[in-house]
Image (spheres, rainbow, N blue to C red):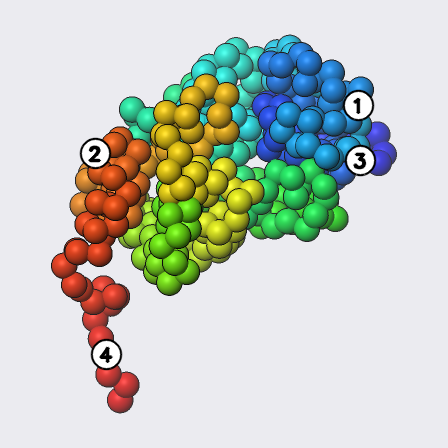
Amino acid sequence: MSEAKDNRIFQRVSVLGAGAWGTALALNAARAGRDVVLWGRDSKNLELISTKHQLPAYLPDITFDQPLETTSDITEAADADCILLVAPAQVTASIAETIGLYVKKGTPVVLAAKGLEKGTQRMMSEVLADYLPQATPAILSGPSFAADVARGLPTAVTIAAPSLPLADKLCATLSSQSFRPYASTDMIGVQLGGALKNILAIACGIVLGKQLGASAHAALMTRGFAEMQRLALKMGARADTLMGLSGFGDVALSCSNHQSRNFTFGYALGEGRALDDLMAPGAKLSEGAYSARVACELAALHGVELPVAQAVADVLEQKDTIDQAVLKLMSRPLRPESEVPFRPIS
C-alpha cells in the first residue's frame, strides 16, 4: 500500500479486548491489511499472542497466521482511526469511560458485544453515547464464531452505522478474503438481533440438554424468533434486518451448535448442572443469562409478550424449574400463529 492515505478505509485499527472474539477480529483486520494493535489486561496472554502467535486459554489448537501488536496501555490503543470495542456487555460502560479522555472526536467505535446492560436496559450504542459522546457508534454482529474467524474460515456479518457511507467504509476496512461484512444503517435491529438470539440460544440448549426432542427444538426456535421480531420491531428495528445475518442468521448458528456459549450454557442446565457452577467466576460467559430479564423488562415497557424469554429468565432466577417452565409454555392459551389477518386468494 502506498504511503498516501486511502480515504476508503481506516488504516490504524485498535481492538479493545484480547479474549477469543477480540483476538479473532484483530487477526482478521491484520489479514485485511490494516495496522492493528490489540489491547488486553492479561499480560501473560498478550505475551503469548505476540511471541507464540497463540491464545491457548481462549483459542486452543490455533496458531495465528498473522503477527499481532499487543499493548496493555489503553491510552495507546485509544489512539486509532477506528476502534473495535470487544468487551462483554456488562463491562462495556467501564471501558468506554476509561478511554473517554483519549478518543478523538468522530472516531468510529465498533461495538461487538451482543447484550443488553443489566439494570439500565440500555443497548450498547446507548452506553457508548453516555460515556463516549464524541465517538461515532457502530455495531458488528452476525453468525460468527471466534474460532472460525481466527482460522480464516468463511464468515459473513453485518456492520451497522448511523450513515451508509460510514458503514461502507467500516466494511471496506474489515473485509478480507475470509470475512465479508454487509453494511446497514439499522443500528437498533442489528443490536437487538444479537442480544435477543442469545436468550433463545439458552432456551434451545435447555431443550436439547434435557432431551425434549427435535420437534420441541424446532418449535422453540420458530416461536422464539417470532417473539424476537415482535419486540425488535416495536423498538424501531427493520423487518429485513431481522431476517438477515444479524437476526435469523445468528439464530440459525447459535441455537444448535455447541460452539455457542449461550447454547452450551443452556445445554448444561438441561442436563442438570447447577446454576451456581455455571455462573461462577471464571466460567464461560453467557451474555443471554444477563439479557433475559432485561428483555422481559423492555417487553413490558413496549407492551409485548415474550413467553420464551420470560421462561428463561424465570429458570435463571430459580422462580421455576425447567419442567414448570415447559408446562407454562405448553399451557398458554391457543392463538393464531400469525397476527396478520387472513385474506383469501381471489
Mark 1 burial class by Cα count in 10 Å: few <14, some 14-19, many 20+: few
Comes first in the chain, label 2 or label 4: 2
State the separation of the CA atoms marked 3 and 1: 11 Å
- Per the image, the residue denoted by label 2 is 319
Single out the mark in the foreground, 2 or 4.
2
- Per the image, the residue denoted by label 1 is 52
Mark 4 burial class by Cα count in 10 Å: few <14, some 14-19, many 20+: few
- Per the image, the residue denoted by label 3 is 65
Q: Please report the residue visible at 43 percent of the width from the left and 38 percent of the height from the top.
A: 268
State the separation of the CA atoms marked 2 and 4: 42 Å
62 left or right, relative to 140 = right
Q: Nearer the viewer, residue 318 or 118?
A: 318
State the separation of the CA atoms marked 2 and 3: 48 Å
Is residue 30 visible to us here? yes
Disc 4 + disc 1, Cβ < 8 Å: no
Q: Quadrant of the C terminus?
A: bottom left
Q: Nearer the viewer, residue 146 or 62?
A: 62
Single out the mark in the foreground, 4 or 3.
3
State the separation of the CA atoms marked 1 and 2: 47 Å
- Per the image, the residue denoted by label 4 is 343
- Label 3 secondary element: loop
